[in-house]
Amino acid sequence: MNTSTVPTTLTGTYAIDPSHSRIGFVARHAMVTKVRGSFNEFEGSGFFDAENPAASHLELTITAASIDTRNADRDGHLRSNDFFDMDTYPEISFVSTAVEQTRPDEYRVTGDLTIKGVTRPVTVDFEYTGSAVDPDGHQRIGLDGATTVNRKDWGVNWNAALDAGGVLVGEKVNLEFEVSAIRTDAR
């Protein structure tokens, strides 16, 4: 039995609208504060099955060099070999391997995240935030998701010791997804 409050009419193929979506991250800096950033260039698509979420799937590709923390020097360092080595690994990707409905408007998406040529499984919890037909007549759905990863699992290891103890960059990184997706198949 489908316990979702998501209308079954929303079943279909969707593409992420990058101009109305955000892929962000938060990492601890100097053990005292958080640095927030985002990736400004990405594309993704997938199939959402409102009646049978397990039949859903998605793929996401991020242009790694589009990283933006609102600090040019820091962004340059993140693009370097110390962190993402973006000249060698220009893309970050995610491909789902399973989708599970956990509550009426919540889904757990498991998949393979590839960063710097290293692929590891991650699970992202998403909340369905609504649907609407926009002024151009496009059916949209909204999803918000988040997960926490250890950057060292993907070989993003650089750090610097602090005089008072601790390190400059925290190992745990919170990934944030605010998605507006447009239906691309015929209704």
Image: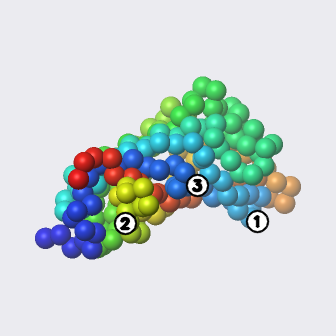
Three-letter code, disc 1? Val
Q: Residue at x 13, y 70 (%)?
A: 1
3D distance between C-alphas at marks 2 and 3: 22 Å
Q: Mark 3, mark 1: which one is toward the viewer?
A: 3
Specify few, some or many for label 1: CA neighbours under 10 Å numbering under 14, 14-19, or 20 or more.
Answer: few
Q: Is residue 125 visible?
A: no
Q: Is residue 70 above or below residue 133?
A: above
Q: Residue at x 42, y 61 (%)?
A: 134
Q: Nearer the viewer, residue 14 or 107?
A: 14
Helix, strand or loop at disc 2? strand
Q: Mark 2, mark 1: which one is toward the viewer?
A: 2
Three-letter code, disc 3? Gly
Horizontal placement of 33 versus 112: left or right?
A: right
Q: Nearer the viewer, residue 86 or 186?
A: 186
Q: Residue at x 69, y 36 (%)?
A: 79
Q: Mark 2, mark 3: which one is toward the viewer?
A: 2
Three-letter code, disc 2? Ser
3D distance between C-alphas at marks 3 and 1: 20 Å
Q: Which residue is mark 1?
A: 32
Number of labelled discs? 3
Tell whether label 1 touches label 2 (CB within 8 Å): no
